[in-house]
Image (cartoon, helix red, strand yellow):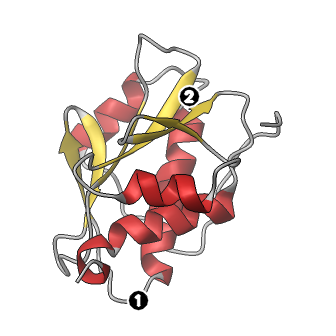
Amino acid sequence: MTSRPFKAVSCATVPAMTPEVAAVFDGYPAAMRPKLEALRQLIFDTAARTEGVGLLTETLKWNEPAYLTAASRSGSTVRIGWKRSAPDSYAIYFHCGTTLIDSFRTLFPEEFRFEGNRAILFKASDRVPEGPLSTCIAMALTYHRNKK
């Protein structure tokens, strides 16, 4: 991956964070916070552009920001996070009981680094392929609707 920074361009109104979610973002290292905020923006932008998703619920799961399609129940939870054990990396997580990561590997074998059947990993210096990642997010947010 190249070393151009990732910065999501907003096309959707992103709600203010709850104090609990904001506290988690505030706890991220200063260099990682904008990268995770850009992932958050991309999740909301993708939800706004994806038919049938509706409003997202932002909450914490495993003390990480998580995005649920609680209103439409169309999809699977998407989480984002950073771990102290891998300080130069951050990730977007998908439910490990789904076939999402297998599908992403098939569609985007060269674009991403995967962790098992649950995450797409990024280094701080990576250029995030926004188009392919938006496709992955949309697939997660419509997983239940589309698996039928």
Position of 134 compared to 66: left or right? right
> Which of the pair 114/49 is nearer the observer?
114
Q: Which residue is denoted by mark 1 in the rendering? A: 51
**Residue at screen point 33% across, 76% down:** 142
- Secondary structure under tag 1 reads loop
Q: Within 10 Å of the Cα at label 1, are there few (<14), some (14-19), or many (20+) other Cα atoms? A: few
Residue at left offset 42%, top offset 10%: 85
Asked whether 16 or 8 is in front, the reply is 8
Residue at 55 percent of width and 68 percent of height? 135
Q: Are marks 1 and 2 in contact (CB under 8 Å)?
A: no
Among the 4 quarters of the image, the one containing residue 145: bottom left
Secondary-structure class at tag 2: loop
User: Mark 2 belongs to which amino acid?
Assistant: Met
Looking at numbered disc 1 in the image, what kind of residue is underneath it?
Answer: Glu
- 21 is higher (above) or lower (below) than 50: above
Residue drawn at x 27%, y 50% is 95
Residue 32 is situated, as x and y percent measured from the top left of the image, at 56, 28
Image coordinates for residue 129, horizontal then vertical, percent: 70, 53
Relative to the observer, which residue lies in front, 130 or 35? 130
Residue under label 2: 32
Q: Quadrant of the N terminus?
A: top right
- Give the answer, above or below, for where 109 lies relative to 44: above
In the image: residue 36, left or right of residue 7: left
